[in-house]
Amino acid sequence: ERALNEGFSGGEKKRNEILQMAVLRPSLAVLDETDSGLDIDAIRIVAEGIKQIFDDTLGLVLITHYQRILNYVTPHYVHAMVGGRIVQSGPPSLAAELESRGYDWLTTGAACTRGGSC
């Protein structure tokens, strides 16, 4: 007897999470840094699993710090958070812009779309 995911590698745990979602079919899932610690092949495998499970009837919030998983899973919207607040929202191309420019530009001037300090 052992706990769920015990003894699994990081990639195995992530793939198992995707399998569990396929079985449970939640109406909304939050995947927090699913791509963290995965190599290129594992990211592709996890992304393919996500694409097979989620359609227009299931919601997904995919939290990531990197563009790489978005090369395989195209979001409908991208929201950038700084200090726990959404400071910019936009189309999928916003993720590529964040990858190339970083986050600093979001905390100054007109980029702060929520008013007040970002």
Image: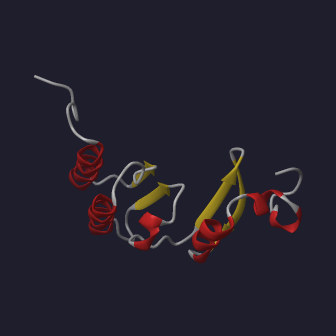
Residue for point 52% across, 60% down: 66
Question: Where residue 32 sits in the image (x, y, percent)?
Answer: 46, 47
Colour mapping used in the image: secondary structure
The N terminus is located in which quarter? Answer: top left
Vertical comparison of 2 with 24: above or below: above
Is residue 90 or residue 58 the one in the foreground? 90
Q: 102 left or right of 114?
A: left
Vertical comparison of 96 with 118: above or below: below
Question: Where residue 77 sits in the image (x, y, percent)?
Answer: 57, 69
Residue for point 20% across, 52% down: 23
Q: Quadrant of residue 9?
A: top left
Q: 49 left or right of 104?
A: left
Is residue 40 or residue 83 the one in the foreground? 40
Vertical comparison of 103 with 71: above or below: above
Question: Where residue 56 sits in the image (x, y, percent)?
Answer: 39, 71
Circle count? 0
Is residue 110 or residue 11 the one in the foreground? 11
Residue for point 72% across, 44% down: 83
Q: Residue furthest top?
A: 1
Question: Where residue 70 sits in the image (x, y, percent)?
Answer: 46, 68
Residue for point 87% across, 50% down: 117
Q: Residue furthest left?
A: 1
